[in-house]
Protein backbone atom coordinates (compact mmCIF):
# COMPACT_ATOMS: atom_id res chain seq x y z
CA UNK A 1 0.00 0.00 0.00
CA UNK A 2 1.66 3.26 -1.03
CA UNK A 3 2.20 5.52 1.95
CA UNK A 4 0.79 8.61 0.27
CA UNK A 5 -2.47 7.30 -1.13
CA UNK A 6 -3.99 4.72 1.16
CA UNK A 7 -4.58 2.37 -1.79
CA UNK A 8 -4.55 -1.25 -0.73
CA UNK A 9 -1.83 -3.51 -2.07
CA UNK A 10 -3.47 -6.50 -3.76
CA UNK A 11 -0.70 -8.72 -2.44
CA UNK A 12 -1.95 -8.28 1.11
CA UNK A 13 -3.81 -11.18 2.73
CA UNK A 14 -7.58 -10.94 2.40
CA UNK A 15 -8.03 -10.19 6.07
CA UNK A 16 -5.72 -7.21 5.86
CA UNK A 17 -7.05 -5.76 2.62
CA UNK A 18 -10.26 -3.94 1.82
CA UNK A 19 -13.08 -4.71 -0.53
CA UNK A 20 -14.42 -2.58 -3.34
CA UNK A 21 -16.76 -0.72 -1.01
CA UNK A 22 -14.03 0.45 1.34
CA UNK A 23 -11.66 1.43 -1.47
CA UNK A 24 -14.36 3.58 -3.06
CA UNK A 25 -16.02 4.64 0.19
CA UNK A 26 -16.14 8.35 -0.56
CA UNK A 27 -17.74 7.69 -3.96
CA UNK A 28 -20.50 5.43 -2.59
CA UNK A 29 -21.34 7.81 0.25
CA UNK A 30 -21.39 10.80 -2.12
CA UNK A 31 -23.75 8.92 -4.44
CA UNK A 32 -25.98 7.93 -1.52
CA UNK A 33 -26.14 11.58 -0.40
CA UNK A 34 -27.08 12.71 -3.91
CA UNK A 35 -29.70 9.97 -4.31
CA UNK A 36 -31.20 10.76 -0.91
CA UNK A 37 -31.52 14.45 -1.63
CA UNK A 38 -32.98 13.78 -5.08
CA UNK A 39 -35.55 11.27 -3.83
CA UNK A 40 -36.44 13.43 -0.85
CA UNK A 41 -37.32 16.30 -3.15
CA UNK A 42 -39.09 14.12 -5.73
CA UNK A 43 -41.13 12.05 -3.25
CA UNK A 44 -41.70 14.16 -0.13
CA UNK A 45 -44.88 12.22 0.70
CA UNK A 46 -43.03 8.89 0.84
CA UNK A 47 -40.32 10.26 3.09
CA UNK A 48 -42.96 11.94 5.23
CA UNK A 49 -44.62 8.56 5.75
CA UNK A 50 -41.27 6.97 6.64
CA UNK A 51 -40.59 9.80 9.06
CA UNK A 52 -43.95 9.20 10.75
CA UNK A 53 -43.23 5.48 11.33
CA UNK A 54 -42.34 5.81 15.01
CA UNK A 55 -42.83 3.85 18.21
CA UNK A 56 -41.90 5.45 21.55
CA UNK A 57 -40.04 8.28 19.73
CA UNK A 58 -37.94 5.71 17.82
CA UNK A 59 -38.07 5.96 14.04
CA UNK A 60 -38.47 2.37 12.85
CA UNK A 61 -36.84 2.61 9.39
CA UNK A 62 -33.78 4.32 10.90
CA UNK A 63 -33.65 1.78 13.74
CA UNK A 64 -33.73 -1.20 11.35
CA UNK A 65 -31.00 0.25 9.12
CA UNK A 66 -28.75 1.18 12.03
CA UNK A 67 -29.11 -2.32 13.45
CA UNK A 68 -28.14 -3.67 10.03
CA UNK A 69 -24.99 -1.53 10.20
CA UNK A 70 -24.02 -2.05 13.80
CA UNK A 71 -24.83 -5.71 14.46
CA UNK A 72 -22.17 -7.21 12.13
CA UNK A 73 -19.57 -4.95 13.73
CA UNK A 74 -20.65 -6.01 17.21
CA UNK A 75 -20.14 -9.66 16.26
CA UNK A 76 -16.50 -8.70 15.69
CA UNK A 77 -16.12 -7.34 19.23
CA UNK A 78 -14.08 -9.94 21.10
CA UNK A 79 -14.46 -9.51 24.84
CA UNK A 80 -11.56 -11.93 25.22
CA UNK A 81 -9.40 -9.20 23.71
CA UNK A 82 -10.00 -7.15 26.84
CA UNK A 83 -7.47 -9.41 28.55
CA UNK A 84 -4.80 -7.86 26.32
CA UNK A 85 -5.42 -4.27 27.42
CA UNK A 86 -2.32 -4.28 29.61
CA UNK A 87 0.02 -5.68 26.93
CA UNK A 88 0.49 -2.42 25.01
CA UNK A 89 -1.10 0.25 27.20
CA UNK A 90 0.12 3.48 25.62
CA UNK A 91 -2.11 3.48 22.52
CA UNK A 92 -5.13 2.55 24.59
CA UNK A 93 -4.41 5.28 27.13
CA UNK A 94 -4.28 7.89 24.36
CA UNK A 95 -7.52 6.62 22.86
CA UNK A 96 -9.43 6.60 26.15
CA UNK A 97 -8.22 10.01 27.31
CA UNK A 98 -9.08 11.61 23.98
CA UNK A 99 -12.44 9.84 23.57
CA UNK A 100 -13.83 10.28 27.05
CA UNK A 101 -11.96 13.10 28.81
CA UNK A 102 -11.31 15.53 25.96
CA UNK A 103 -13.45 15.05 22.87
CA UNK A 104 -17.00 15.40 24.33
CA UNK A 105 -16.06 18.57 26.19
CA UNK A 106 -14.14 20.28 23.38
CA UNK A 107 -17.07 19.57 21.04
CA UNK A 108 -19.51 21.12 23.50
CA UNK A 109 -17.20 24.11 24.02
CA UNK A 110 -16.82 24.68 20.27
CA UNK A 111 -20.58 24.35 19.82
CA UNK A 112 -21.27 26.96 22.50
CA UNK A 113 -18.60 29.27 21.10
CA UNK A 114 -19.88 29.21 17.53
CA UNK A 115 -23.64 28.78 17.91
CA UNK A 116 -24.12 31.02 20.93
CA UNK A 117 -21.55 33.70 20.13
CA UNK A 118 -19.77 33.70 16.75
CA UNK A 119 -22.93 32.89 14.76
CA UNK A 120 -25.37 34.57 17.16
CA UNK A 121 -26.37 37.22 14.62
CA UNK A 122 -26.87 34.65 11.86
CA UNK A 123 -28.63 31.74 13.54
CA UNK A 124 -31.82 32.21 15.64
CA UNK A 125 -31.35 31.28 19.30
CA UNK A 126 -33.73 28.30 19.23
CA UNK A 127 -32.04 26.86 16.15
CA UNK A 128 -28.64 27.44 17.71
CA UNK A 129 -29.58 25.36 20.75
CA UNK A 130 -30.82 22.55 18.53
CA UNK A 131 -27.60 22.50 16.47
CA UNK A 132 -25.61 22.58 19.70
CA UNK A 133 -27.45 19.50 20.95
CA UNK A 134 -26.63 17.68 17.71
CA UNK A 135 -22.90 18.37 17.82
CA UNK A 136 -22.80 17.35 21.50
CA UNK A 137 -24.30 13.99 20.55
CA UNK A 138 -21.64 13.57 17.87
CA UNK A 139 -18.82 14.47 20.23
CA UNK A 140 -19.94 12.02 22.91
CA UNK A 141 -20.02 8.98 20.61
CA UNK A 142 -16.59 7.61 19.59
CA UNK A 143 -16.44 5.53 16.43
CA UNK A 144 -17.27 1.81 16.60
CA UNK A 145 -17.82 0.57 13.07
CA UNK A 146 -16.04 2.73 10.50
CA UNK A 147 -12.84 2.77 12.53
CA UNK A 148 -11.98 -0.65 11.12
CA UNK A 149 -12.00 0.93 7.66
CA UNK A 150 -9.72 3.78 8.76
CA UNK A 151 -7.42 1.35 10.55
CA UNK A 152 -7.14 -0.82 7.45
CA UNK A 153 -6.39 2.17 5.26
CA UNK A 154 -3.34 2.91 7.43
CA UNK A 155 -2.45 -0.77 7.76
CA UNK A 156 -3.04 -0.52 11.49
CA UNK A 157 -2.69 -3.38 13.94
CA UNK A 158 -6.09 -5.07 13.48
CA UNK A 159 -5.98 -6.90 16.82
CA UNK A 160 -5.08 -3.77 18.73
CA UNK A 161 -7.82 -1.82 16.95
CA UNK A 162 -10.24 -4.52 18.07
CA UNK A 163 -9.04 -4.11 21.66
CA UNK A 164 -9.58 -0.35 21.47
CA UNK A 165 -13.07 -0.71 19.99
CA UNK A 166 -14.03 -3.39 22.53
CA UNK A 167 -12.98 -1.23 25.47
CA UNK A 168 -14.75 1.81 24.00
CA UNK A 169 -17.97 -0.13 23.48
CA UNK A 170 -17.99 -1.33 27.08
CA UNK A 171 -17.38 2.22 28.35
CA UNK A 172 -20.04 3.61 26.01
CA UNK A 173 -22.72 1.44 27.59
CA UNK A 174 -22.17 3.22 30.90
CA UNK A 175 -20.75 6.63 29.97
CA UNK A 176 -22.61 7.87 26.88
CA UNK A 177 -25.92 8.75 28.54
CA UNK A 178 -24.41 10.50 31.60
CA UNK A 179 -21.97 12.54 29.48
CA UNK A 180 -24.71 13.59 27.06
CA UNK A 181 -27.05 14.48 29.91
CA UNK A 182 -24.30 16.46 31.67
CA UNK A 183 -23.35 18.46 28.58
CA UNK A 184 -26.91 19.08 27.45
CA UNK A 185 -27.79 20.16 30.97
CA UNK A 186 -24.86 22.56 31.06
CA UNK A 187 -26.25 24.20 27.92
CA UNK A 188 -29.76 24.43 29.42
CA UNK A 189 -31.24 21.87 27.01
CA UNK A 190 -33.90 19.72 28.64
CA UNK A 191 -32.90 16.04 28.62
CA UNK A 192 -35.68 13.43 28.39
CA UNK A 193 -33.87 10.74 30.36
CA UNK A 194 -36.29 7.95 29.46
CA UNK A 195 -35.79 8.50 25.73
CA UNK A 196 -32.02 8.85 26.13
CA UNK A 197 -31.71 5.60 28.08
CA UNK A 198 -34.02 3.83 25.62
CA UNK A 199 -31.78 4.93 22.75
CA UNK A 200 -28.60 3.74 24.47
CA UNK A 201 -30.24 0.41 25.20
CA UNK A 202 -31.56 0.01 21.67
CA UNK A 203 -28.49 1.11 19.73
CA UNK A 204 -25.61 0.12 22.02
CA UNK A 205 -26.52 -2.44 24.66
CA UNK A 206 -28.80 -4.70 22.62
CA UNK A 207 -26.58 -4.86 19.50
CA UNK A 208 -23.56 -5.49 21.73
CA UNK A 209 -25.40 -8.28 23.57
CA UNK A 210 -26.68 -9.78 20.32
CA UNK A 211 -23.18 -9.64 18.84
CA UNK A 212 -21.69 -11.28 21.94
CA UNK A 213 -24.21 -14.13 21.94
CA UNK A 214 -23.78 -14.68 18.21
CA UNK A 215 -20.01 -14.70 18.50
CA UNK A 216 -20.09 -17.08 21.45
CA UNK A 217 -22.27 -19.52 19.55
CA UNK A 218 -20.10 -19.33 16.42
CA UNK A 219 -16.86 -19.84 18.35
CA UNK A 220 -18.36 -22.86 20.10
CA UNK A 221 -19.23 -24.41 16.72
CA UNK A 222 -16.21 -23.55 14.59
CA UNK A 223 -13.82 -21.17 16.33
CA UNK A 224 -12.67 -17.85 14.95
CA UNK A 225 -12.92 -19.18 11.39
CA UNK A 226 -16.68 -19.53 11.87
CA UNK A 227 -16.85 -15.93 13.10
CA UNK A 228 -14.94 -14.73 10.03
CA UNK A 229 -17.25 -16.68 7.68
CA UNK A 230 -20.34 -15.26 9.38
CA UNK A 231 -19.01 -11.71 9.21
CA UNK A 232 -18.25 -12.17 5.51
CA UNK A 233 -21.85 -13.30 4.90
CA UNK A 234 -23.47 -10.44 6.81
CA UNK A 235 -21.05 -7.70 5.73
CA UNK A 236 -23.16 -6.84 2.65
CA UNK A 237 -26.10 -6.07 4.96
CA UNK A 238 -23.89 -3.68 6.94
CA UNK A 239 -22.82 -1.95 3.73
CA UNK A 240 -26.39 -1.76 2.45
CA UNK A 241 -27.50 -0.49 5.85
CA UNK A 242 -24.90 2.28 5.77
CA UNK A 243 -25.80 3.47 2.28
CA UNK A 244 -29.56 3.20 2.83
CA UNK A 245 -29.24 5.11 6.11
CA UNK A 246 -27.40 7.90 4.29
CA UNK A 247 -30.08 7.90 1.56
CA UNK A 248 -32.84 8.04 4.17
CA UNK A 249 -31.24 10.76 6.28
CA UNK A 250 -30.51 13.01 3.34
CA UNK A 251 -33.96 12.27 1.97
CA UNK A 252 -35.46 13.51 5.24
CA UNK A 253 -33.24 16.59 5.33
CA UNK A 254 -32.62 17.13 1.60
CA UNK A 255 -35.04 20.05 1.21
CA UNK A 256 -33.53 21.84 4.21
CA UNK A 257 -30.00 21.26 2.92
CA UNK A 258 -30.84 22.68 -0.50
CA UNK A 259 -32.82 25.60 0.90
CA UNK A 260 -30.32 26.54 3.62
CA UNK A 261 -26.78 25.83 2.39
CA UNK A 262 -25.38 28.60 4.62
CA UNK A 263 -26.71 26.84 7.72
CA UNK A 264 -25.05 23.59 6.63
CA UNK A 265 -21.75 25.42 6.16
CA UNK A 266 -22.05 27.06 9.58
CA UNK A 267 -22.77 23.75 11.33
CA UNK A 268 -19.77 22.23 9.56
CA UNK A 269 -17.34 24.83 10.96
CA UNK A 270 -17.09 23.57 14.57
CA UNK A 271 -17.25 19.96 13.35
CA UNK A 272 -14.25 20.51 11.06
CA UNK A 273 -12.26 22.29 13.77
CA UNK A 274 -13.07 19.53 16.24
CA UNK A 275 -12.15 16.73 13.84
CA UNK A 276 -8.77 18.08 12.80
CA UNK A 277 -8.00 19.37 16.28
CA UNK A 278 -8.74 16.07 18.02
CA UNK A 279 -6.73 14.12 15.45
CA UNK A 280 -3.64 16.24 15.92
CA UNK A 281 -3.94 16.11 19.72
CA UNK A 282 -4.05 12.30 19.66
CA UNK A 283 -1.51 11.95 16.84
CA UNK A 284 0.87 14.36 18.54
CA UNK A 285 0.55 12.54 21.87
CA UNK A 286 1.22 9.21 20.15
CA UNK A 287 4.30 10.64 18.45
CA UNK A 288 5.61 12.19 21.67
CA UNK A 289 5.10 8.87 23.47
CA UNK A 290 6.88 7.00 20.63
CA UNK A 291 3.97 4.71 19.90
CA UNK A 292 4.50 2.62 16.72
CA UNK A 293 2.63 3.88 13.65
CA UNK A 294 0.42 0.78 13.27
CA UNK A 295 -1.06 1.63 16.69
CA UNK A 296 -0.64 5.42 16.67
CA UNK A 297 -2.62 6.03 13.48
CA UNK A 298 -5.71 3.99 14.46
CA UNK A 299 -5.76 5.42 18.00
CA UNK A 300 -5.81 8.97 16.57
CA UNK A 301 -8.42 8.10 13.95
CA UNK A 302 -10.69 6.42 16.53
CA UNK A 303 -10.80 9.64 18.51
CA UNK A 304 -11.46 11.72 15.42
CA UNK A 305 -14.24 9.61 13.91
CA UNK A 306 -17.75 9.56 15.36
CA UNK A 307 -20.31 6.83 15.95
CA UNK A 308 -22.66 8.85 13.76
CA UNK A 309 -25.17 6.00 13.56
CA UNK A 310 -25.81 6.31 17.30
CA UNK A 311 -25.74 10.12 17.24
CA UNK A 312 -28.31 10.32 14.45
CA UNK A 313 -30.61 7.78 16.07
CA UNK A 314 -30.47 9.45 19.49
CA UNK A 315 -31.00 12.93 17.98
CA UNK A 316 -34.10 11.69 16.17
CA UNK A 317 -35.40 9.98 19.32
CA UNK A 318 -34.74 12.93 21.62
CA UNK A 319 -35.63 15.88 19.41
CA UNK A 320 -37.48 14.59 16.35
CA UNK A 321 -36.64 13.78 12.77
CA UNK A 322 -37.01 17.32 11.47
CA UNK A 323 -35.15 18.92 14.36
CA UNK A 324 -32.02 21.01 14.14
CA UNK A 325 -30.25 18.43 16.30
CA UNK A 326 -30.98 15.71 13.76
CA UNK A 327 -29.81 18.02 10.97
CA UNK A 328 -26.52 18.68 12.78
CA UNK A 329 -25.82 14.96 13.11
CA UNK A 330 -26.57 14.51 9.41
CA UNK A 331 -24.08 17.28 8.63
CA UNK A 332 -21.66 15.21 10.72
CA UNK A 333 -22.12 12.37 8.23
CA UNK A 334 -21.52 14.80 5.36
CA UNK A 335 -18.29 16.07 6.91
CA UNK A 336 -16.86 12.84 8.28
CA UNK A 337 -15.92 10.83 5.19
CA UNK A 338 -13.84 13.47 3.36
CA UNK A 339 -12.24 14.58 6.63
CA UNK A 340 -11.27 11.04 7.62
CA UNK A 341 -9.90 10.22 4.18
CA UNK A 342 -7.76 13.38 4.26
CA UNK A 343 -6.41 12.39 7.69
CA UNK A 344 -5.71 8.84 6.52
CA UNK A 345 -3.67 10.28 3.65
CA UNK A 346 -1.81 12.59 6.05
CA UNK A 347 -1.07 9.73 8.43
CA UNK A 348 0.28 7.55 5.65
CA UNK A 349 2.54 10.37 4.45
CA UNK A 350 3.97 10.89 7.95
CA UNK A 351 4.50 7.26 8.85
CA UNK A 352 8.25 7.90 9.12
CA UNK A 353 7.64 10.10 12.17
CA UNK A 354 6.98 7.02 14.32
CA UNK A 355 8.98 4.02 15.54
CA UNK A 356 8.87 0.93 13.39
CA UNK A 357 6.29 -1.77 14.02
CA UNK A 358 7.29 -4.15 16.75
CA UNK A 359 8.69 -1.45 19.03
CA UNK A 360 6.97 -1.88 22.37
CA UNK A 361 4.40 0.90 22.89
Image (cartoon, rainbow, N blue to C red):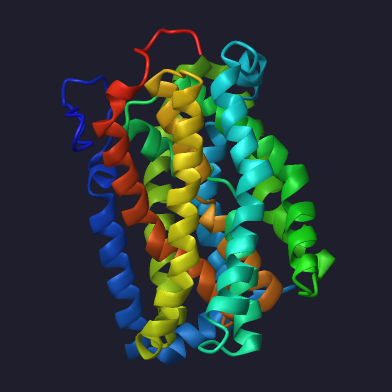
In this picture, residue 219 sits left or right of residue 56: left
> Which residue is pictured at 30% across the width and 81% down the height?
38
- Asked if residue 214 shows in the view, the reply is no
Q: Quadrant of the N terminus?
A: top left
Judge by depth and name the residue closer to the eye, 23 or 138: 138
- Asked if residue 274 shows in the view, the reply is yes
Looking at the picture, how far across and down is residue 31, in whole percent? 26, 66
In this picture, residue 8 sits left or right of residue 95: left
Count of marks overlaid on the render: 0
Looking at the picture, how far across and down is residue 207, in whole percent? 63, 45
Judge by depth and name the residue closer to the eye, 109 or 23: 109
Judge by depth and name the residue closer to the eye, 49 or 176: 176
In this picture, residue 355 sits left or right of residue 101: left
> Which residue is pictured at 63% across the width and 70% down the height?
112
Looking at the picture, how far across and down is residue 294, in whole percent? 39, 22
Looking at the picture, how far across and down is residue 346, in whole percent? 29, 39
**Residue 29 falls in image quadrant:** bottom left
**Residue 126 falls in image quadrant:** bottom right
Q: Is residue 51 above or below residue 33?
A: below
**Residue 293 falls in image quadrant:** top left
> Which residue is pictured at 72% across the width and 50% down the height?
176
Q: Is residue 231 above or below residue 52?
A: above
> Which residue is pictured at 32% across the width and 40% down the height?
344
Amino acid sequence: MPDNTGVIDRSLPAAAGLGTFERWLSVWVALAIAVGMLLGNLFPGLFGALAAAEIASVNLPVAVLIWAMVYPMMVGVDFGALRQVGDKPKGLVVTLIVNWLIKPFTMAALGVLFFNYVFADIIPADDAQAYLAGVILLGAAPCTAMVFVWSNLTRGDATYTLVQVSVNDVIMVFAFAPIVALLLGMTDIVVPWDTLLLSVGLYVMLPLLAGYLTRRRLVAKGGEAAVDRFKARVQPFSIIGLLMTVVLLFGFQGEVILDRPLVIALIAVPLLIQSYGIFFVAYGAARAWRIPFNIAAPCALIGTSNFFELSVAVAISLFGLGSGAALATVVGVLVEVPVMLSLVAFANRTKHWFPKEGTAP
